[in-house]
Image (spheres, grey):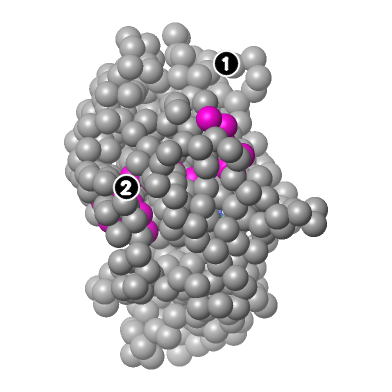
Amino acid sequence: MIVILDLGSEQNAQIAREVRALGVYSEIHPHDITADQLKALPGVRGIILNGGKNRVVDGAAIDAGEAVYQSGLPLLTVEHTAGSDLDRWPADDAERRDCLSRFVFGRCGAAANWNMKNFIDDQVELIRRQVGERQVLLALSGGVDSSVVAALLIKAIGSQLTCVHVNHGLLRLGEPEQVVEVFREQLHANLIYVDASKRFLDKLAGVAEPEKKRKIIGTEFIRVFEEEARRLQGIDFLAQGTIYPDIVESGTKTAKVVKSHHNVGGLPEDMQFELVEPLKMLFKDEVRACGVELGLPEGMVYRQPFPGPGLGVRCLGAITADRLEAVRHSDAILREEFAAAGLDRTVWQYFTVVPDLKSVGVRDNARCVEYPVILRAVNTVDAMTATVEDVPFPLLQKITARIVSEVAGVNRVLYDLTPKPTATIEWE
Ligand code: XMP
């Protein structure tokens, strides 16, 4: 592997991805890595000293330790200066690729053997070694990361894995059914399906404040999962879909903490599990490639991001059964039409929102007072800012016609033209 040493750069992950794109595995490590830590990493062929604008800490520039300079390994120094061309390091840049390639293959003599098939073979071996004959539990949301972890663990340890899929009643049309079909019927997983819809909706009844809704959904999710975990005997491991950005974004020694990575299980302390996190060194696109290699359906692997609180934050204000149904049904129409137009692979995130207000309309020559549906389709790299997709007008008209005729209680459709900022991607 090639080690990327973080000397205050904001592009550690980008360089790591570029090295991996050459077919050579790479990992990011802190600048003060010790000789022992370096020795413990398997097969290190070279080190990239990756400096950048956070290099100066408390008035002094940080540098790699003696361990690095005395390792005898080939070193490449990269310095990104704010405002320079290097600062952006464009991905399509042949000169940059050449430079990395000369270092990785020429000076380090690395072999291009990093691919998904080898990754899966290695992980299967590692998981078997870690788990032995014991039992593993996984909260399977149906999202990309937990689905790929499930598929990998099924391949490695089969029936020693128990998956719990909690339907909180705020999933999209067909989602829980797909999880059951793929994991129970096709992959023969031990899958416990918990339909907790009523329980969640009862708890949420009358709650209009968005953060309160989120909290109720998060807390209740952990309760349901915990109840299922307690019912099972002899579980030693909890599997998690932690991926590399979760670790990188937790903050290195020089970068600001972007967001703290926390244990998604959130289980109480008296339930002691060891963690199995087989994807923790993969970037999102690599997780998807791994899922495809493991035979998961493309619709599951390439699905758009979906927030944990699900449709709960798209049915604005206090959730009611009629508006929740309107969000679910209109979302299904939007997804169907985007897929038919080929936009499902290019637009980052698209969904519908139903606010808690009605407007006057006319239906069958009579006045009707019904809800509007808001369409939203955005593109972003990191979800911190977002631009609005320029959806062709005829497609918007087609989606509008379908929604007002097929979704009960909806007489109006709007397209949200606001980028982030000032809007956020979600409405709540
Ligand atoms: P905002 O609305 O903050 O959304 O611009 C940025 C991205 O985060 C997703 N999102 C969430 N994801 N739990 C999640 O797991 C949440 O509570 C949550 N809120 C927003 C949102 O869908 C978008 O992709």
Q: Is residue 158 above or below residue 277?
A: above
> Do we see residue 25 in this rendering?
yes
Q: Quadrant of residue 250?
A: top right
Query: What is the quadrant of the N terminus in the image?
Result: top left
- Circle 2 residues within 10 Å: few <14, some 14–19, many ≥20: some
Q: x, y percentage for residue 318? A: 67, 57
x 25%, y 36%: residue = 120
Is 27 colored magenta in this rendering?
yes
> Do we see residue 201 in this rendering?
no
Q: Which mark is residue 108?
A: 2
Q: x, y percentage for residue 377? A: 46, 74
* Region of the chain picked out in magenta, as a range: 18-35
Horizontal side, residue 4 vs residue 220: left or right: left
Horizontal side, residue 57 vs residue 82: left or right: right
Q: Give the structural element (helix, strand or loop) at label 1.
A: loop
Question: The residue under label 1 is which amino acid type?
Answer: Gln
Looking at mark 1, is its residue's CB closer than 8 Å to ligand 1? no
Q: x, y percentage for residue 344? A: 32, 68
- Circle 1 residues within 10 Å: few <14, some 14–19, many ≥20: few
x 59%, y 45%: residue = 64
Q: Alpha-carbon distance for marks 1 and 2?
A: 43 Å
Residue picked out by circle 1: 272
Of the two numbered discs 1 and 2 on the same chain, state the one appearing first in sequence: 2
Is 248 colored magenta in this rendering?
no
Q: How many marks?
A: 2
Q: Give the structural element (helix, strand or loop) at label 2.
A: loop
